Each structure stands twice: as C-alpha cells, then as structure tokens.
Amino acid sequence: MRRPTPALIVASFGLAISLGLPASTPASAPDDFYGVNAQALFAEPSSGWDTQLDAIDAGGLQLVRTDARWAVIEPRAPDGDMRSYAWSGPDAIVQALAEHGLRWYPVLEAAPGWAAQASGDISPAAARIPDFAYFGFALASRYGRGGSFWRLHPALPALPVIDYEIWNEENSAVFWPSQADAPERFADLFIAARQAIRAVDQQARVVIGGLALVNPPLVSDEVTFLERMVSHRPDLIGQVDGVGLHPYQATPADTYARIDRVRSAVNELLGPSVAIDVTEVGWSALAVPEPQRAAYLDALATDLPRSNCNVADLLPYAWVTPESDPSNPEDWFGIWSKDGSPRPSGQAFTQSALSMRGLSPSTPAAGGELDLCPTAHAAPTTPVARRTAPPGPRLRLRVEANKRRHRITVFARCPAGCKLALALMRRRGSKLTAVAHRSTRFSTRRSRVRLRYPRRARRLQLDVVATGANGGRTVRVREIPRPKRERVTQSG
C-alpha cells in the first residue's frame, strides 16, 4: 500500500535533516485546498493511472475532481422502490485515488435518458428531481464518511468524499440546454440533493456546480443566475456550503476581478461565510505560451489561499488532456504530459502547492493577506433575505418561420411593459446548441425580433424570457420544427 505522504516530500524531508534545516515551514494554505481536474486521465486505460497519480500525490495536491455521471451509474429507471446502481467505474477511481492518498471531489451531473428533461437534454425533468436526490444519497452512502465502500476495503486509507459538487456549468446551454428557466429548476434540484446528502453526512459540503462566466448566447450571467436562484428559493440561505466557479480569464488579474464580482454577489445573497470553490481554471497551451502558463498558475496558487476572497479550493483544469488535435485548444489545457513527464506549468503549480502547504523546506510559504476582493468586502456582511419572486408580466407571443430565408421572426408584447431576452437553439442528434441570441430594452410596444438559423437545422427551440418592471419573469419555451412550407406561424 502506498503511503499518503508524497514521495517528493519524503525526499525533501531527508535532505533537510541531512543539512540541518527545518523539515517544514509554516503553511499559508490549509489541507484539501489544492487539487486538479483529471477527467481525461480516467478515460485512459487504468494501467497508466499509477504514474500520473504518483505525480499528483508528490506535487502536494490532495483533491481530484472528476465526474459522477448519473446516466452511467443509474442507467435504468427504478422499478418501484428497487434501484440499481453500477458502482464498478467509480469504485476503481476511488480505490486508485485512496491508494495514492488522494480524495475524490465528485461532480454529480448528467441525467439518464429516463430522467432527462427532453431528448438530447441532460438536465433532469422536474418530476425526476427526487430521483437525482436519491442518487446523491446513494453516492454519499457509498463513498462518504462511514460509507459502504470503505467498509468493504478496510485496508485502504479512509479518504471519504467530503465535497459534493452539484452539476457542472448549469448556467451554460452546453450542460443545461434550456437556460430560460435554468436558475429556478437548478435551485430546486440543488436543495433536494443537499438535503439528501446531508441526511447521510451532516458535515458534508454540498457545492453549487461550477458557474461559467457569462458568454451569450451559450452562457447566462453567473451573478444573475445566482440572484434568480435565491429569488425562486429564498430557503437557499443557510443551505449552501460553497459556490463553484470557473473564472477562465486572460490573466490572473482578470481572474481576481471576476472572483471579486462573484464574491460580492455571494456575500449579499448567501452570506460571507459561504466559500467559493474554484473548481476549474486554466489556460490552453495553444493560446498562452508555456512559461506564461507557469507564471499564471504560480500566481493563483500563491495568491488565492491568502486572499480575502474566502476561496476554499483551487482545482485547475486539467492534469492531462487528450493532446490529439493540434488545432483544438480544449486538447491542450493539460499541465502534465500524457507520457507522465511534467510541463513547466505543472511544475510551477505543484511547487507552489508544496510551498504554500509548508512542505517545501527550500521555499517558504508566502505570507500576508492580499486584498483581492475589495468590492466584495464593501457589501453587506449578512445575506439579504429575498422575498418570493414577483409575478411575471403577461406575454403575448407569435412566431413565424421562413424556410427560404432560414430565419424566424418573433412578435412579442407585454401590455404593461417588459424587457425580452430570446435564445434560439438547434437540436442536432442528441446535442442542443445555441445559434442566435437577442435582447430588447424595456417597452410597452410590440417587439419584432428576427433570428437566423443554420441552413441544415431541422429542429429548433426558442426560449423567451420577459422581465417586467417589478423584476418578475415570464418564460416561454417553443419547439419549432423546420418548416415544410414557405411559412409556418405559431401563436399564443
């Protein structure tokens, strides 16, 4: 059995004693602060896992984030009270992690077909939210504190799951296709899942899934998303243990500014004690030179644990990535090579983690608090209770589809006035992607908005959100099949 103490730390400890140096220095980062995303690693044959996990362990990282996909673990619908879970995949991952002294940071996501909102939509139907909650209960019962997995493997170091991230980028149409009512639906899902997990482990941290930064039309504004969640479910106050964030930005300074913005919103909506978990962040090697990536990751690892932003975890994306398509930036976020050799970015991040944890005798931890979130700490120190969402405006809607010009025209009016946000999405196979996005100013007049769609699009979905003067919202979702005639009109 491998010892949980990183091999590199053991070597450094021996060297320190031989030189008469102190074995460690005061830490500026707590345990379980540093981790890494390893989705691509566990997609590879298990024969290659040990080399990479040895390096993660030796680098002073303690958390490994990867998916707990509901669709894979519970592919069949329950038969009455009988449920069937396929644990072999996560069992192998958790065992490999524990053998290297690493803890799993699971992301609970991806509804199976029997529980999905619609064909090609991996978000769960409202009626299936209790099933997702039971999935969270089952996962915590197996891998959490005192879980059955640890009882079945008494020889393993007991490193139970203590953080549960609910969904991934739920404010993105990639992972939650229909954004029109996503904040409200996700708020219901989160509360149900947290209550189920806390029934197993009252100390578990249940975290709002990592929010992507606004990028219309695919990604909704992360702060507005949180505001709508709390407006819909004021009982979220006191029931959120962390807010996940994916602050991908051009530089560390830009990253800190976006963390500050979200920190301010979390303080106001949920309270300053609710931490931010940076569950993804990084730079593609195709966009940023390797020496710059190394400097950026060193800055994040050194600055965030001693900032006033209340960041609980830092897990860059990613340890390894496929490295297969030389033109695809997504394939080159890895900070370690697939052959097990380090990149400068990986060396910089792991060395900073060791130093900040007080485990590098030759490099003392940086000290002193950094004021990286000045805006956040000017916000209220207690959450502002949100009343029940006000009623949405009355919305009159008519849609015309023009096949020849490959566009739809939306006629909308709120008699008392409203602002409109429209998103047109295309279904292709099992994938739903946004193809057009428009918004209007507040008006009492009828609005006419044209949205173009790709020539070969056969199934379209239109999401319309009307926001009234009182902040209330009315949501309409329309399925628009590709017109067979010159023009098809929908009213209502």
Image (cartoon, rainbow, N blue to C red):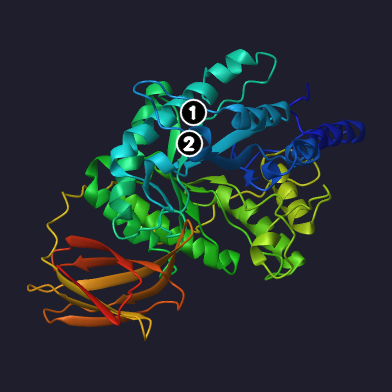
- Residue at the (23%, 51%) spot, across then down: 231
Q: Would residue 164 be visible to someone looking at this image?
A: yes
Q: Please tell me whether mark 1 sits on a helix, a strand or a loop.
A: helix
Task: Look at label 1 and name its amino acid.
Answer: Leu
Q: CA distance from mark 2 to mark 1?
A: 10 Å
Could you say which is closer to the camera, residue 421 or residue 111?
A: 111
What residue does disc 1 label? 139
In the rendered view of the protein, which quadrant contains the C terminus? bottom left
Q: Earlier in the sequence, mark 2 or mark 1?
A: 1
> In terms of secondary structure, where does tag 2 sit?
strand
Q: Residue furthest front?
A: 485
Whether residues under marks 2 and 1 lie with C-beta atoms below 8 angstroms apart, the answer is yes
Amino acid at dot 2:
Tyr
The residue wearing badge 2 is 164
In depth, the one of 224 and 72 nearer the eye is 72
Instruction: From the viewer's perspective, tell me whether residue 131 is left or right of residue 210.
Output: left
